[in-house]
Amino acid sequence: MKTKTILSILCGVLVCFVGSSADGALVAATDSSSPGGVNNVTSDTATGLDWLDLTASSGISFDNILLQFGTGGTYEGWRHATQAEVNDLIVNSVGLPLANQPILDPIAVQFVTFFGITQTSSVTSSVAARGRYNDDLTGSIANSAGSAFVAYRTGSSFLPDFTEASILDDQPVINSVVPISGTGHWLVRATSDTPAVPEPATFVQAALGLLGLGWFVKRRKHAAMSSKS
């Protein structure tokens, strides 16, 4: 009975693992050393970058975030993504066009789920994952925060469905000293800086090994019962 239960659980784990591969290159993970709680990090295996959930930095000014990147800071080890990195994430890794679409794109829904809802509107039934990025790595431009977002609306009798993804080079508009309501920060780090976790292949090998062990135990019990009879 115990063997059957173990096999059932392991089969369920394998099914969940196979199902998660449908998410493509994005994998949700938890880093307890960073803010945001469970599944606060999204790893992009295509680019080798980790992304911190937008909700983990929402409502904080651009300049204040910069002060927290150093040793002992709240966002130690992280940095602002560049415009190119945000573009690569949305367009190439996820596959969303930078445009308005008169549909409810399931990819956008999944994207917002991964990175967190920073803005909602009960009037338009829309939600968005919005964040700020660093538009200038040289440090020579003041107010160097651009913004990028993915949003969708579920629609109603008077408002149709829609999906929008946009990257705005709006540094003249955004004051880096003032936090913007409903906006987080696109924070990244190399995946090599992520706390070590078992690779997917390791999970599969371990599961297959336990399945084999369960089969071996079951065979031995069956053989022992046969010999007694």
Image (tube, grey):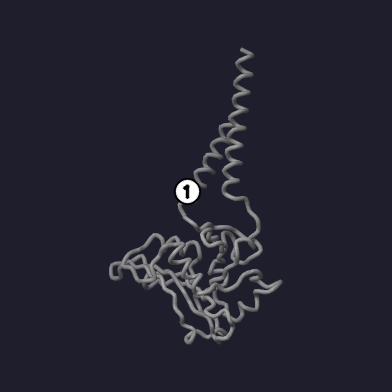
Left or right relative to 69: residue 100: left
Seen in the image, is 31 located left or right of residue 124? right
Quarter of the rendering containing residue 71? bottom right
Q: Identify the residue at image location x=37%, y=62%.
A: 105
Q: Which quadrant does the N terminus fall into?
A: top right
User: Residue 120 appears at what percent x and percent y?
Assistant: 44, 71
Q: Is residue 2 visible?
A: no
Rendered location of residue 103, percent (x, y): 32, 64
- In the image, residue 154 above or below residue 180: above
Query: Which residue in the structure is indicated by mark 1?
Result: 19
- Residue farthest to the left? 158
Q: Quadrant of residue 185?
A: bottom right
Q: Residue furthest front?
A: 138
- Foreground residue among 160 and 105: 105
Task: Characterize the local packing of mark 1: few (<14), some (14-19) or many (20 or more) Cα atoms within 10 angstroms.
Answer: few
Residue 206, percent across and down?
Answer: 61, 41
**Count of marks overlaid on the render:** 1
Residue 147 place in picture, x, y as percent: 48, 77
User: Which residue is located at x 68 percent, y 74 percent?
Assistant: 70
Q: Amino acid at mark 1?
A: Gly
Compared to residue 92, the image places residue 220 above or below, namely: above
Q: Secondary structure at mark 1?
A: helix
